[in-house]
Amino acid sequence: MNTPDRIEFGLQLPGLPELHGLVRDFAARALDLAEFPASRHDELLEAFLCGVELVERTLAGEGDRVVPMEIFASIDADALEFRVLEHGSPLGGSLQGAPGRDIQERIRPATVFDRLWWVQKGQEGSELHFRAMRDHASIEVLEAIRHRIDAEEAEAADADVHPSDRTAAYQVRSYRAGDGMAIARRIYEAYGRSYPNPDLYVPERVDRLNTEGRLHSILCESESGEVVGYYALERPELGPVGEAGQAVIDHRHRGHGLMQPMRAAVEEAGRALGLLGIWSQPTARHPVSQRMNLRFGAHPSALCLGTTPAGASLRGGVSGEKEDTVHPARHSCFLYWHPLVEEPPLIAHVPESLLGTLRAIYEARGRSVTFDATPTKVTEGGERVRSRLDSVRGVAWIEVDRVTRGCLDGIRAAREAMESSAGAQTIFVDLPIDDPGCAFVAEELLADGLRLAGIGPRFRAVADERRGEDVLRLQANPAPVDFAGIVVEGDLGRRLADAVLQPAGKVPPG
């Protein structure tokens, strides 16, 4: 289900002064929902009722016929707008002409409403609009609805990891040619058209990606052979690590613990491919998918803010929409890592301010790490910075292969270009954690206003293409992030979140 980002409601009644009390109650409730302070609330209420009364007085001239009138209110992040639609003699015209001038003068829009105007709607009648700007974007009742829906979705998702007496009747298998249409339908039913990976809506692309090995799809079938669940191991670059994700279950078959065997099949596929490990990005909107990662031996490695457009519905219906432009707070994901082979020792060059958080991440992961917080400047020339943009998600990555003399300037220029020219709404900077210059560059970028994300496990390709090495991931968020909606599971997750959610440019706790 998509949570609304605006409230719209209306009142239909005869245009009679005797019903003025009903109109007052309607308008007062709308102003309450819009959270105007008391003095402005009362001023707007009286001004609106004055406008309605003038319309009613005009309609009273229609003789014995009672003319219907409709009153609407809409509230969004920006404003409250009232609309009064009358079905009698045409009113309005220019606000400089009667009766528009009379209403304008009586309501004093310059000091009460921010805007007042007529809209002629042909056979429907004339509509008088009153618009008052709000002081802040949040709407308390919608926030409460959003958290209730998220809790309900989390409760339903929790049932997807615990078996029932029917679980054994389902079969989990790998992809077969021709399964792409069933996968596209499951994605659509779960996310509408809002899922940020467009490949999954095109069966031919799903088939090609599986053939190339860039996607290893796992499907769950019912007793009748219908595809009712989907999970995938993603390797778009055919590298030594894979991502577990794209998990959906047909709502008619939820509550039977089907996520568990599908995730187990993903893990087995990773082992069969000889991968170093599997990472995943469980949503930070509820703890259930985080718990499943913990159950499989994965641990939080980073908290990546604003990874998902605001309009992407999580386990939504077919009403999924494009990214919201009215209330555009983006959603976040944790990054979990599950190594599939023993990891070699590492010397990590990181700022002293990050030592406590990063040490806890590596201890949970079980990797032996020696930390060096010396901010070593590098004089060697050459620039080793590259950047890429996912325009669908609005996410950019700036990746550094090796820290050199021009590296810091290159990162800053790439960040500026991604933010101002490419319109990236989330920017990640991945630094080679085993490079002696990493600590110095990271300190400078934190001072520039970036914040910690965490560790990108084995994300950097090295000379041995089957090895890969960790990166220190920092992040910038030009677009608003839904901080209030971040839910954390586990002690390490909370410690990581405390460090990441420090105000940008502040030093995380040690």
Image (cartoon, rainbow, N blue to C red):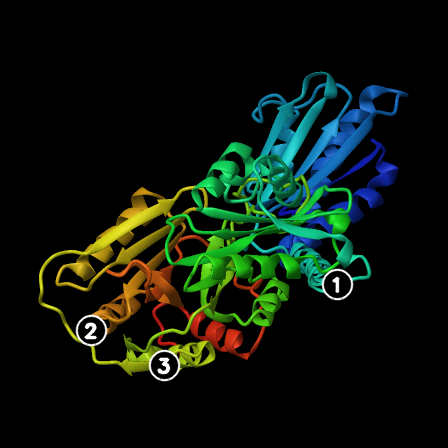
Residue drawn where x is 69% and y is 63% of the image? 161
Answer above or below: position of 155 versus 76: below
Q: In this view of the protein, can residue 220 be seen by the observer?
A: yes
Q: CA distance from mark 3 to mark 2?
A: 18 Å
Q: Nearer the viewer, mark 3 or mark 2?
A: 3
Q: Which residue is mark 3?
A: 368
Q: Which residue is mark 2?
A: 436
For label 2, the SS is loop
Residue at the limit of the structure toward the right, as seen here: 64
Residue 25 marker: none
- Asked whether, in this view, residue 326 is left or right of residue 144, the answer is left
Q: CA distance from mark 1 to mark 3?
A: 36 Å
* Dots 3, 2 in contact, CB < 8 A: no
- Asked whether, in this view, residue 184 is left or right of residue 274, the answer is right
Q: Quadrant of residue 411?
A: bottom left
Q: Quadrant of residue 376?
A: bottom left
Q: Quadrant of residue 343?
A: bottom left
Q: Nearer the viewer, residue 203 or 267?
A: 267
Q: Nearer the viewer, residue 305 or 248?
A: 248
Answer above or below: position of 304 versus 21: below
Residue drawn where x is 83% and y is 25% of the image? 67
Answer above or below: position of 258 versus 443: above
Q: Which residue is mark 1?
A: 163
Across and down, in percent, residue 498 comes to 48, 75
Label 1 Cα neighbours within 10 Å, binned few <14 / some 14-19 / many ≥20: some
- Three-letter residue code for mark 2: Pro
Residue drawn where x is 86% and y is 39% of the image? 19
For label 1, the SS is loop
Sequence-first tag of 3 and 2: 3
Quarter in which the C terminus is drawn:
bottom left
- Three-letter residue code for mark 1: Pro
Q: In this view of the protein, can residue 112 be seen by the observer?
A: no
